[in-house]
């Protein structure tokens, strides 16, 4: 399927935003980036809430949706599935293969992303360092990386062929050193991360930066809260 009009992407460069830039780059379809500065609260603006009611980015508006009519989609996992179905790529049509991809997509959406977000918050951003919380989410980070490492044993990609599941996970997993795991613990994950980062479309998707200077989290406590709430999914 050809895309004649650009897809509008509402985005900020975080692991959730990268999922969609990677997918769009892999598809090679035209898109326009609209930066939603989550440090400044752009995600709460009424015009954004009309199509992203949970005040989260990313979101897209496809001017060439079903029946040729525009459609908006929010939630990164739903966007990946929509684009995969529309263009018939990176999302299997065979039901067994699709279930396998969906399992790992929702593993990321429900566990890997949110739990690593909690790790970031309590270990890095929280003004008060709570040993119980830090230990809890450090242990959970190790557990989740272990699950991913086992899944990648003998596999090049998470769920058979390269898919939206890999795109959903890579933005978080590429930060593995920040999550206090070692290459010795997760050799399969590290090899997979390097494999994905070598893909030109992944590199281009991760390189989509904001047009505004980053928020200084060390000085802006309110921005810390906003950024944590956005990332922890």
Image (cartoon, rainbow, N blue to C red):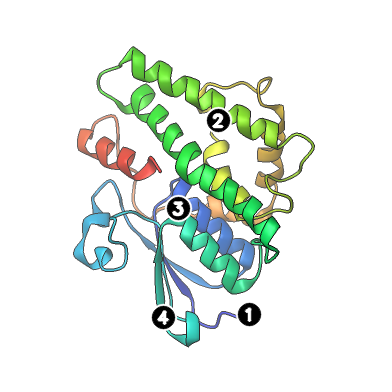
Q: Which mark is residue 17?
A: 3
Residue 131 point in image, percent of width and height = 35, 13
**10 Å crowding of disc 3: few (<14), some (14-19), many (20+):** many
Compared to residue 164, the image places residue 188 above or below, namely above
Residue drawn at 25 percent across, 18 percent down: 128
> On residue 188, which mark appears?
none
The earlier-in-sequence mark between 3 and 1 is 1
Question: Which is more foreground, mark 3 or mark 1?
Answer: 1
Q: Which of disc 4 and disc 1 is earlier in sequence? A: 1
Q: Position of residue 162 (x, y in %)?
A: 70, 53
Name the secondary structure under disc 4.
loop
Relative horizontal placement of residue 137, taking residue 89 as reference (left or right)? left
Q: Among all residues in the image, which is located at the extreme top?
A: 131
217 above or below 109?
Answer: above
Q: Earlier in the sequence, mark 1 or mark 2?
A: 1
Q: Which residue is mark 1?
A: 1
Residue 101, percent from left and from top: 63, 52
Marks 3 and 1 sit apart, C-alpha to C-alpha, by 24 Å
In the rendered image of this protein, does residue 9 appear above or below residue 41? below
Badge 4, how many Cα within 10 Å: few under 14, some, many 20+?
few
Regarding mark 1 in the picture, which secondary structure is present there?
A: loop
39 left or right of 173? left
Q: Are marks 1 and 2 in contact (CB under 8 Å)?
A: no
Which residue is labeled 4 in the image? 70
Residue 203 visible, this angle: no
Report how far apart the C-alphas of labels 1 and 2 lie in the structure: 37 Å
In the structure shown, which secondary structural element does the residue marked by tag 3 occupy?
A: helix
Q: Residue tagged by mark 2?
A: 144
Badge 1, how many Cα within 10 Å: few under 14, some, many 20+? few
Picture residue at 47% right of the left edge, 79% below the top: 65
Query: Which circle's residue, 4 or 2, is located before the other in the chain?
Result: 4
């Amino acid at each position: 399927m050809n895309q004649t009009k650009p897809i509008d992407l509402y985005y900020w460069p975080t692991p959730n935003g990268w999922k969609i830039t990677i997918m769009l780059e892999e598809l090679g379809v035209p898109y326009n980036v609209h930066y939603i500065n989550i440090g400044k609260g752009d995600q709460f603006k009424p015009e954004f809430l009309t199509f992203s009611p949970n005040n989260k980015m990313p979101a897209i508006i496809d001017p060439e949706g079903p029946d040729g009519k525009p459609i908006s989609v929010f939630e990164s996992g739903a966007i990946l599935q929509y684009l995969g179905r529309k263009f018939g790529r990176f999302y299997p049509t065979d039901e067994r293969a699709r279930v396998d991809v969906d399992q790992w997509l929702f593993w990321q959406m429900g566990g890997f992303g949110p739990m690593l977000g909690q790790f970031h918050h309590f270990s890095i951003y929280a003004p008060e360092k709570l040993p119980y919380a830090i230990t809890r989410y450090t242990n959970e980070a190790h557990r989740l990386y272990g699950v991913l490492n086992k899944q990648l044993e003998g596999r090049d990609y998470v769920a058979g062929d390269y898919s939206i599941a890999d795109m959903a996970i890579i933005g978080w997993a590429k930060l593995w050193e920040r999550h206090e795991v070692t290459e010795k613990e997760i050799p399969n994950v590290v090899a997979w991360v390097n494999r994905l980062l070598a893909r030109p479309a992944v590199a281009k998707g991760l390189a989509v930066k904001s047009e505004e200077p980053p928020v200084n989290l060390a000085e802006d406590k309110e921005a810390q809260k906003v950024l944590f709430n956005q990332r922890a999914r």
